[in-house]
Amino acid sequence: MANTQPAELPATELLAAYAAGTLSPVEACEAVLQRIDDHDPALNAYCLVDPDTALHAARESEDRWHRGQPAGRLDGVPTSIKDIFLTRGWPTLRGSRTVDAAGPWNEDAPAVGNLRRENSVLLGKTTMPELAWKAVTDSPRHGTTRNPWNTARTAGGSSGGAAAAVATGMGPLALGTDGGGSVRIPASFCGIATIKPTYGRIPLYPASPFGTLSHAGPMTTTITDAALMLDVLAQPDVRDWSALPAPTGSYIDHLGGGVAGLRIAVSTDLGFTTHVDPQITRAITRAARTFSDLGAHVDQADPDITDPIEDFHVLWFAGAAKATQHLTDAQRELLDPGLADICRQGLTYTAQDYLEATNTRMTLGQRMGAFQQTYDLLLTPTVGIPPFQADRESPTEGDRWTTWTPFTYPFNMTQQPAASIPCGHTDDGLPIGLQIIAPRHADALVLRAAHAYEQTHPWPRTTTPRQN
């Protein structure tokens, strides 16, 4: 897919162009900043943009490339940071009016530090719902992020700003988080690629109040870029007690090999949900046929699980209560009303409730482990419905976001790696996401399968915001 627009090039092609001398990091940075000027007013993907800092970093990168001495695997690649990650020199407001912008802000989160060490060009911070509590992106502090394929619709969340930025060429790489689907849901709604890796693969600091549900993940236009970014992010940090050791190899070096001979299950409802649009069912079925055509053994099969929504609520709502326990009564009045609701609910749970939810989580993990003794991979929709109206938590008034995300939060509970990649569009042109799930620690297998699909069904890398 040849493309001469610098803002539409993936990171791997930018790096190749820098090496060939056909494009400079400054030119790429300027093109991306122009995209932000052109498109972000309609989308609200960024809550902070720092062009002076980005251009300074780009000039330093350009000098290194001209001297033939690039320093880092992402040297000169424009990258955005979700506003939940501590970032030295920039406020981390988390979409909340309760956070004091004055700081001090003198520390990088592990993932941000890894990006900085590889000399990526940091552009700014992307928008998120308050404290990342829901699967759409709007907050009292920063307003609503809109879907670039139809600005009347939601971009999803909680990494909605990151997804909208990548989908429109406002930075080829974005760093997001996922506690119940928060990289995969907006990736599906905005038509980009992502992976929620195995828990602990990307270190987190400070520790999330949502505990071991929360993962970090790369958000990109191609799976190759996702693998490259994961190579950078997957380095342990002593500040995260639960971080995994460094990978023994490179994810980007293991993308080849295809899916021939793999045992793959496809489930369009996980055996328990009825909230699946027929257009999405058809798209997932077509995608499954592609894997069969590529030599995989594909069966229709549901894992032996039931919907863990109530237990997820115990874990999630208790985490929200923990995240806000330090607030005064006056500060609580400033919270997103939905967040305030789940915080109150979280305070009603007992230690026994939390332990029961944890037991359900362990049982779910055991059942998925047994299921994946038979199947190497599980294919599902990422989201069972198309993007709906912006400024709503759910398409149905009064429902929590978990009612329409049954395909994502179970795999935060099990800590398994799960990717989302585009696999088609609805009749009115909105993206559909395919979720690919593997056993814990099989991140490379997820990326390999996603790459195999991407090679046969390449998708548009960027779009221009549309009003329908």
Image (tube, rainbow, N blue to C red):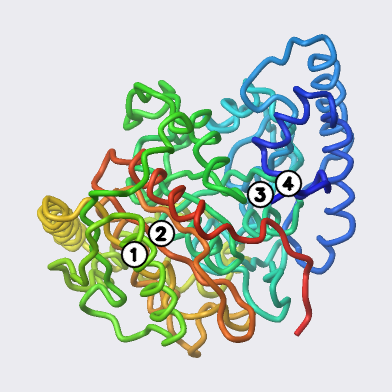
Residue drawn at 83 percent across, 28 percent down: 58
- Return the residue at label 4: 171
Mark 2 belongs to which amino acid?
A: Ala
Disc 3 + disc 2, Cβ < 8 Å: no
Which label lies toward us, 3 or 2?
Answer: 3
Residue drawn at 27 percent across, 55 percent down: 296
Disc 3 + disc 1, Cβ < 8 Å: no
Q: Secondary structure at mark 1?
A: loop
Q: Secondary structure at mark 2?
A: helix
- Return the residue at label 3: 93
Lower position in the chain sequence, tag 3 or tag 4: 3
Disc 1 + disc 2, Cβ < 8 Å: yes
| Percent coordinates x, y for residue 100 in the rendering | 69, 46
| Percent coordinates x, y for residue 18 in the rendering | 78, 26
Q: Looking at the picture, does residue 72 appear above or below residue 278?
A: above
- In space, the residues marked 4 and 1 are separated at their CA atoms by 40 Å
Lower position in the chain sequence, tag 3 or tag 2: 3
- In space, the residues marked 1 and 2 are separated at their CA atoms by 6 Å
Lower position in the chain sequence, tag 4 or tag 1: 4
- Return the residue at label 2: 321
- In space, the residues marked 3 and 1 are separated at their CA atoms by 24 Å
Q: Secondary structure at mark 4?
A: loop
Number of residue marks: 4
Which label lies toward us, 3 or 1?
Answer: 3
Q: Which mark is residue 347?
A: 1
Q: Nearer the viewer, residue 367 or 412?
A: 367
- In space, the residues marked 3 and 4 are separated at their CA atoms by 21 Å
Which label lies toward us, 4 or 1?
Answer: 4
Circle 3 residues within 10 Å: few <14, some 14–19, many ≥20: many
